[in-house]
Each structure stands twice: as structure tokens, then as C-alpha cells.
């Protein structure tokens, strides 16, 4: 019945019901749309964070690749307890950056015996020439021995406890190229290292 006492038109109540339920359907539709939008927002945030982290990583990688180590020699290990550190050939005294064939070249390094038992350096060899080992080839446990540049030749007097390794080359050695040198220790084995040439003295620091 309508408010005037008559029968309502057939479509009036249906229309009223449709109008009454329209807000509920709109709420359900809006709620359904909110979920995908929330997920999309989270995906965008995650992508932004990933890009930021990638940028930071790239910057760190570039910085690391541009850094130069303070030690210009090479290093290696023999067995479990013997460590060779900062192994290098000094830069040639001439300005050419080359040792001519026949030169005597000192091998600079530090040998560290990290074990309890003494270690012994029994041989040093290189395809670049003949190697002489002079002085303290015995390294007590828990100590180190340093082979320095010394003077120009292997005949210079040695300090007690000092080690000197001298390479008499049969071919020119050029700055920027590594020279293979093998170090052999009794009961420990051997290691071959690509030994670089040091930087010029006026370039240090």
C-alpha cells in the first residue's frame, strides 16, 4: 500500500529495495578494490627499497675497486703454519724501470712461522735466474724472519739472524710484470708466487 491507501505499483518496491541495497554493494566493491591497491602499494615500496639497496651496493663496489692496498707485495702460505708476507722485488735504481740481464735483484719478504716447531727454508728457485739464499734459514716457532733489500750484492756482510735472498737474473725484468719465484720449506712443502716489482721510491706515500 502507498501512503494514499492505494496499492503500490509493482516496480516501486523493487526500486526501493534496489536503492536501499545500493550503498551496501558499493561498500563491498570499494572494500574489494582496496585490497589490490594495498598490495600494489606494498609492491611499489618493496621495489623502491630494492633499488635503493642496489644503488648503495654499487657505490660501495666502486669505492672498493678504487682503493689501493697499502702493501704492494704478494702473499702466500706453505702448509698450515708458514706464511709469506709482502713478497716483492725492489724497483730498479735506474729510471728506466728495468733490471738488465745479469743484475742482482734482492727478494724482499717476511717469513712468519705460526707453529710451535722450527721451520727451515731449504730452497728458492725462479725461471728468471739463479737464486742465492744467505743467512738465517731457520725460523723458530712463533717468530718471523725478514729478508730486506740490503745492499747491491750478495757479498755484503749479514747481521746475525738476518736473511737475504738474491736473484741473479738471466733476462731483463720490467716494472709492472710479476716474476714467478718458488719457496720450498723442509717438511712443509713449497709455494710459487707471482712476485711483483715494488713502486718507485719517489711514488711512495
Image (cartoon, grey):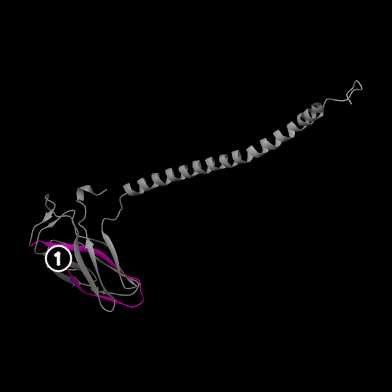
- Furthest residue in direction right, as rendered: 5
- Residue 116, position in %: x, y? 36, 76
- Residue 21, position in %: x, y? 76, 33
Q: Is residue 6 above or below residue 22?
A: above
- The residue drawn where x is 23% and y is 70% is 183
**Badge 1 is on which residue?**
167
- Furthest residue in direction top, as rendered: 4
**Majority secondary structure of magenta residues:** strand
* Residue 25 appears in view: yes
Closer-to-camera residue (112/188): 188
Task: Assess whether residue 32 is covered by the magenta stretch.
Answer: no
- The residue drawn where x is 19% and y is 64% is 180
Report the side of 60 relative to 157 (left or right).
Answer: right
Residue 71 falls in image quadrant:
bottom left
Closer-to-camera residue (86/17): 17
Q: Quadrant of the N terminus?
A: top right
Q: Look at the numbered disc 1 and give the secondary structure of its residue.
A: strand
Closer-to-camera residue (194/203): 194
- The residue drawn where x is 50% and y is 41% is 48
Residue 159 falls in image quadrant:
bottom left
Magenta part of the chain: 102-127
Residue 32 falls in image quadrant:
top right
- Residue 67, position in %: x, y? 32, 48
Report the side of 103 relative to 147 (left or right).
Answer: left
Q: Is residue 98 above or below residue 170?
A: above
- Residue 146, position in %: x, y? 26, 66
Report the side of 61 relative to 34 (left or right).
Answer: left
* Residue 84 appears in view: no
Amino acid at each position: 500500500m502507498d501512503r494514499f491507501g492505494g496499492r503500490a505499483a509493482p516496480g516501486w518496491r523493487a526500486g526501493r529495495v534496489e536503492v536501499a541495497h545500493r550503498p551496501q554493494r558499493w561498500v563491498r566493491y570499494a572494500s574489494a578494490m582496496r585490497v589490490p591497491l594495498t598490495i600494489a602499494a606494498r609492491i611499489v615500496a618493496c621495489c623502491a627499497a630494492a633499488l635503493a639497496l642496489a644503488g648503495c651496493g654499487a657505490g660501495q663496489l666502486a669505492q672498493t675497486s678504487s682503493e689501493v692496498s697499502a702493501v704492494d707485495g704478494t702473499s702466500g702460505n706453505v702448509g698450515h703454519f708458514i706464511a709469506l708476507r709482502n713478497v716483492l722485488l725492489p724497483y730498479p735504481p735506474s729510471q728506466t724501470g728495468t733490471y738488465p740481464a745479469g743484475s742482482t735483484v734482492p727478494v724482499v719478504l717476511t717469513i712468519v712461522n705460526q707453529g710451535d716447531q722450527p721451520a727451515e727454508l731449504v730452497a728458492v728457485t725462479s725461471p728468471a735466474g739463479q737464486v742465492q739464499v744467505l743467512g738465517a734459514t731457520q725460523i723458530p716457532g712463533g717468530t718471523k724472519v725478514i729478508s730486506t733489500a740490503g745492499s747491491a750484492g750478495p757479498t755484503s756482510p749479514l747481521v746475525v739472524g738476518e736473511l737475504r735472498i738474491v736473484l741473479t737474473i738471466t733476462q731483463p725484468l720490467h716494472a709492472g710484470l710479476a716474476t714467478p719465484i718458488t719457496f720450498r720449506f723442509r717438511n712443509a712443502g713449497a709455494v710459487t708466487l707471482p712476485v711483483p716489482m715494488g713502486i718507485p721510491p719517489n711514488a711512495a706515500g
